[in-house]
């Protein structure tokens, strides 16, 4: 591992499902506490941290609860669920001593600042953790797309996608035991092999702007810090 962090500014994207941990719904306090510990370890290295979290632990616009709902309404509920998660994380992070600002794509002035690119960058440069809430603010876009959009807008060095699996495989490793794991894969190989890293709009945005993506197991202790310090963890997706 290098002495200095490899990355100066990162955007971490995690699903809401990670926050529910052992539960079927809501929050797992142990998981969130560990998340805060991992974030603090990176902030203490002087790395600027931005975060996008999904809302699947509460409500998903494409989930079973929304089977008979208008898609726009369902997606709006899902985006607001990410704001609830952002507030939960803000509280826990601040109790760990971090300064946190929530920037919401849907105006919520009583609990969050509006998303303004320049303001987000100022917060990051001041050492504050920035949590982007409410996705892109528009229906029909996933939080993967929001993560790719915000990462590019703030000039992040890398988009880190935290999951429950080691990284990118040739097939679902839970269904195909002999699936091949990729340590490194190019954008073109992802398309040729039809690897499911993130939705098409999000992936295209990263590829078109040469933003590297690292897919890794966020449930493993200290994986986030190891990546930031230069250790090869998970799968790196990049250009040729």
Image (cartoon, rainbow, N blue to C red):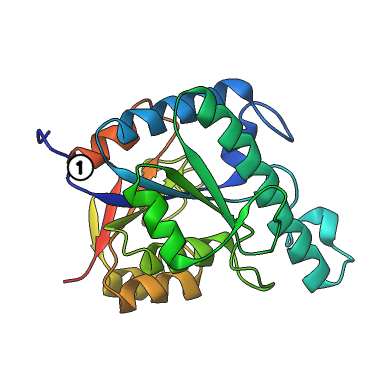
Question: In x, y percent, where is residue 76?
Answer: 76, 64
Which one is in front, 19 or 198?
Answer: 19
Q: Residue furthest right?
A: 68
The quarter of the displayed image where residue 204 is located: bottom left
Q: Residue at x 59, y 65 (%)?
A: 142
Q: Quadrant of the C terminus?
A: bottom left
Q: Quadrant of the N terminus?
A: top left
Question: In x, y percent, where is residue 179?
Answer: 37, 49
Q: Residue at x 57, y 60 (%)?
A: 143
Q: Is residue 232 visible to us here?
A: yes
Looking at the image, residue 34 lies above or below residue 61: above
Q: Which residue is mark 1?
A: 232
Q: Residue at x 32, y 79 (%)?
A: 208
**Number of numbered discs present?**
1
Question: In x, y percent, where is residue 109?
Answer: 70, 55
Q: Residue at x 57, y 20 (%)?
A: 30
Looking at the image, residue 69 lies above or below residue 111: below
Q: Residue furthest left?
A: 3
Q: Residue furthest bottom?
A: 208
Does 137 sit left or right of 210 as displayed? right
Under circle 1, the secondary element is: loop
The quarter of the displayed image where residue 63 is located: bottom right
Does 139 sit left or right of 36 as displayed? right
For disc 1, the neighbor class at 10 Å (few under 14, some 14 to 19, many from 20) is some
């Amino acid at each position: 591992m290098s002495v200095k962090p490899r990355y100066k500014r990162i955007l971490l994207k995690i699903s809401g499902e990670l926050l529910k941990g052992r539960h079927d719904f809501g929050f797992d306090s142990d998981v969130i506490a560990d998340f805060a510990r991992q974030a603090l370890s990176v902030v203490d290295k002087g790395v600027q941290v931005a975060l996008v979290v999904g809302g699947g632990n509460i409500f998903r616009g494409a989930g079973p609860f929304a089977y008979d709902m208008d898609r726009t309404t369902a997606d709006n509920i899902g985006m607001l669920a990410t704001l609830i998660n952002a507030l939960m994380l803000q509280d826990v992070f601040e109790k760990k001593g971090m300064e946190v600002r929530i920037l919401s794509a849907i105006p919520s002035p009583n609990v969050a600042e509006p998303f303004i690119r320049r303001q987000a960058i100022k917060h990051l440069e001041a050492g504050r953790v920035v949590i982007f809430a409410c996705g892109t603010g528009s229906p029909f876009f996933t939080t993967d797309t929001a993560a790719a959009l915000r990462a590019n807008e703030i000039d992040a060095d890398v988009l880190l996608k935290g999951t429950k699996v080691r990284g990118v495989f040739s097939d679902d490793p839970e269904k195909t035991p002999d699936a091949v794991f990729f340590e490194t894969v190019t954008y073109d190989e992802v398309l040729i092999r039809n690897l499911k890293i993130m939705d098409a709009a999000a992936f295209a945005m990263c590829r078109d702007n040469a933003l590297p993506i690292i897919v890794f197991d966020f449930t493993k202790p200290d994986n986030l810090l190891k990546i930031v310090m230069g250790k090869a963890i998970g799968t790196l997706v990049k250009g040729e």
